[in-house]
Structure formats: structure tokens, C-alpha cells
Image: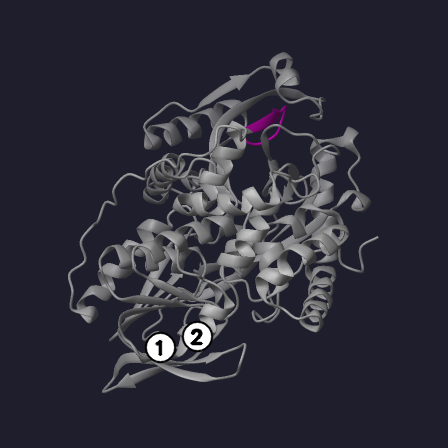
Amino acid sequence: MNAWNAAWRDAALPGLASRDWDLLVVGGGISGAGILREAARQGWKCLLLEQRDFAWGTSSRSSKMVHGGLRYIAKGRFGLTRDSVRERQRLLDEMPGLVEPLSFVMPHYRGGFPGPRVFGGVLTVYDALAGRRNHRFYDPAQLRYLAPGLRPDHLLGGTRFYDAVTDDARLVMRVLGEARAAGGEALNGVRVLELLRDGGRVVGLVAEDRESGRPFTFRCRAVAQATGAWAGALGAGERPARIRPLRGSHLLVPHWRLPVAHAFSFMHAADQRPVFVFPWEGATVIGTTDLDHRETLDDDPRIAAEEVDYLLAACTQQFPAAAIGPADVLSTWAGVRPVVGEGGARRPSDESREHVLWVEPGSVTLAGGKLTTFRLLAREVLQACAPFVGRPYQDVTPPPAVAPDLPRHLPAAVRRRLAGRYGAAVTALLRDLDRTGGACIGDTETLWAELAWAARQELVLHLDDLLLRRTRIGLLLADGAAAELPRIRALCQPLLGWSDSRWLREEQAYHALWRRCYSLPAASP
């Protein structure tokens, strides 16, 4: 397998800039990764450019849900829900171990909304769109066994249904790996400065290598912009709508402090917004908020003190005996959703999650959209790009993935997890497993071998790439995994090719970033 690391990047960048591309994709989140993969499967010559790191934006800071958009049924958006539940099932079938079923429980209380009959009716429609029955009601006695610790007063019972959960950043890396295997290329740390136009048509772009400051010009037949909340920043022709950046923030606490086996969905008493408490990566997540994000998009978003209070109040509302407080929080994260605004004074939660395409000659901009439907969005973008590329778009069904033959001495759960996260690359990763052993990092499910693989083979440019996106140990371990950093350094510094001074700079920058954007805000008690 060819190297995909910083040394390869530095050597390859001038050659990649000199080529003539069918398609340049701008943006390295799940939408951009999906567009690159589908274009590569068409046989198009395609390259993705990401200004920071793959999944740096929304695609590493989402609520981790691969869902069908249950609440969109109430808004009459049946098409969006239908597409989402079908894509959810596709991902469950194609990526077990990375996209996993998750049981949801909606408790019902006397006088509360939604009641069991109303919610059961919505779920019946949801099941019909999915093509399978997927829910069941439990009375209070049954629910106490299914979900101990719930607030018991006036409890009528609870409805259980299923959606799915993922590690969103690993999903991006899995899709990028499949894109590269099909012939595409991807670079991080390359900031697009402007589009090149000739006679009113986009024919390429000017970019800057953020690591070296070197400028590059890329030529192409079409540009696909999938930049999330930055949509339209490079120009996108006629734009009848605007992007409304909405921030969703989350708290993560140790599983032993709030040991839930299901995702609990309920309405926050303060504003009747849906919030969740759910298990993820061996910990428990409390989320999410939905606020206008008024800070610059170029900085890492961070949770505000009032959001911390809001989420802790939600947890206390539903699990009062747990007494979760600020001292229990391991980490936080905040993501900015690229929602297409409909105008007026609509509440953030009332905005549509539909997407739009903005088209000008030689360029297609994707605005809005959902993680779950990234494949459908990619197909729509490529259909719009095809006339510019001069090659027809055809729906290509890739051959079924061959299940890797993983060593039987590994526990079944580990084999499933590794195969899901790394796909066809998992057999190469096993060589790192032979060198590092099968130990996990701290009390996480992440193997030391995964760190070694990422450092060697997943285009890590900075320490936060490694600890916050290639792996999630910066979220899952106290103080951003500070106690493990000496061992991480011993393993990864040689693989990254960093000098001692470079490592120290990276460590200092990582600590500062973690304290600023992934811990509790200073104003919080």
C-alpha cells in the first residue's frame, strides 16, 4: 500500500497541482468525501482539497447519529425521511462495526408531549417508510428493567425504537479510503483562495499549502464545493437562500457515572426541544443544543457556559438520581451545522434540514444536507457536474466488500470494530497490531495499533488530527489524554518524523486547543 502521510503529501503536491483534473472537490467533511468516492467510482480523475483536516468541521463534531429524521415526519418532509431511513439501512449493511444499531427510548409522562399514542402513530409512519416494524411500547413496570434510573413520577411508560450511531470522523476516513482505492486523491492543509474563471466559466482554483505557504494552481473541468457552513464563500452564482450556521454542543461523561444502555430521547423542560442521552465509544453523551453560531467559522467552535447549564439541566430532569454535574464532564465538543435558512425569525430548531445546489458554469455548490444521506447528495452533485466534465454520470454499484480474514485470537467485538473503521485497510493495520500488541489505550476501546496506523498512514499533520479525529482518545480520556502523552510520543513521534522541538510545539498547541474548545468553559463552575 502506498504511503499516505506528510512526507508523501509534500512530495506529491506539486505533481498533483500540475495535472488536469475532471473534478476538484473542495471540503473534506462527509459530503466532500462522498463526492470524491462516487466520482472516483465513475472513473473521473478527481482530487479533494481540505483547508484544515479531514472531518475538522461538522463531520467530527456531530451528534454521531445516523438516523432517518423522525422529527421531520411531523413537519411533513416524508421524502427526506424516506431517503434517510433507506440510507441508514444501507450504511448498517455496508459498514457494520462503524455504523451500528442503537436502541432509542422515549419516556412518556402524564401531561407531557408526545404521548404514547401520538408517538406510536408517528413511528408507524416511520416504520412504513423504512419497510419494517421497528418499535414497541413498554409499560412502567417493564420500563424500570429496561431503563433504570429514569425519573419515575407520573411515568406512563416508554416507546423503544431503533436508529443508528457512528464515529463520524472515522466514517469520513473510511469513505476517503474507499475513494483513494478507486483512484481518487485527497489532501488536507490546502486552503482554496479563489476560483479561476475563463469566459465566465470556472476552470480551476488557486490554493495555498497552509503548512509551507506555497501557492498552487489547479486546473479542472468542474469544481464541487462541499464546504458546509462556508458554502458560497468562493462564489456560487445565484443564491436564493443563505446558510444559517447553527451550533450544536455536547457533554461527554464517563459511562460509570451515567450507565445507559440505550439512547434516551426527551423534550427539554425549558424549551420543549428534543435532547438525547446516549452511549458512545464506552462513554455517555448528553446533547445537543441548537443556537445561532455568531463567531468566526475559521476558529474551532466551543461550548458556551449557558449551553453547559442547559445540558446538565436536561440530564438532571431525566436522571435526577445520577446527580451529574460539571465535575463529571470528561470533555465537550461543539459543531456548526450548515443549515439552509428559510428567512424570517424562525427558531433554529424549526429550520429545514433540506439541501440545495447552487450551480454556475463549471462549479456546483452543495448547501445543507445530512450526514445520513451523504451518498445521495454526492450523486446529485455529480449529476450536476457531469455536463461540465463532459462525461455521463451513471449510478455505479460497487462490488460487495470482501470480509477481511482477521485473526481468530482477537475477540469478535474487536474484529468487527476494526473491520468497520478501516475497511479493506484493516489487514495492513494488523501489522501494527503485531508490533504494539492488542492493548487498548487507557479505558477506551481504541488500540495502540490504531494510533500507530494513523501516524504512519492517515495523513496526520498535527497532533490534534491524531488525538481528536483519527482516534477519539482526546475526548474519551481525562484532560485530553494528557496522562498517555509520554507513551503516545514514544510510539508516534518516530512514525510522524517529528523532531523533539516539533513534538513539544505540537503538544503545547494541542493542550491549548483542548482547554479552549474541548473542556468546560472558564465561566462554568
Q: Is residue 480 above or below residue 46?
A: above
Q: Residue at x 36, y 64 (%)?
A: 185
Kind of residue at badge 1: Gly
Most foreground residue, 239 or 249: 249
Asked which colour scheme the image uses, the reply is: one colour
Measured Cα–Cα span from mark 1 to mark 2: 8 Å
Residue 275: percent from left, percent from top:
60, 41
For the question of whether residue 165 can be seen, the reply is: yes
Q: Specify whether residue 395 is painted magenta.
A: no
Q: Residue furthest top?
A: 141
Residue 264 vs residue 66: left or right?
right
Picture quarter containing residue 242? bottom left
Which stretch did the figure color magenta? 105-114
Element assignment for label 2: helix
Looking at the picture, how far across and down is residue 395, in whole percent?
20, 50
Mark 2: amino acid: Ala
Question: Residue 15: which numbered mark, if any?
Answer: 1
Q: Are marks 1 and 2 in contact (CB under 8 Å)?
A: yes
Q: Position of residue 1 (x, y in %)?
A: 39, 55
- Return the mark for residue 11: 2
Q: Residue 256 location, x and y as percent?
A: 73, 32
Q: What is the number of the mark on residue 313? A: none
Q: Is residue 301 visible?
A: no
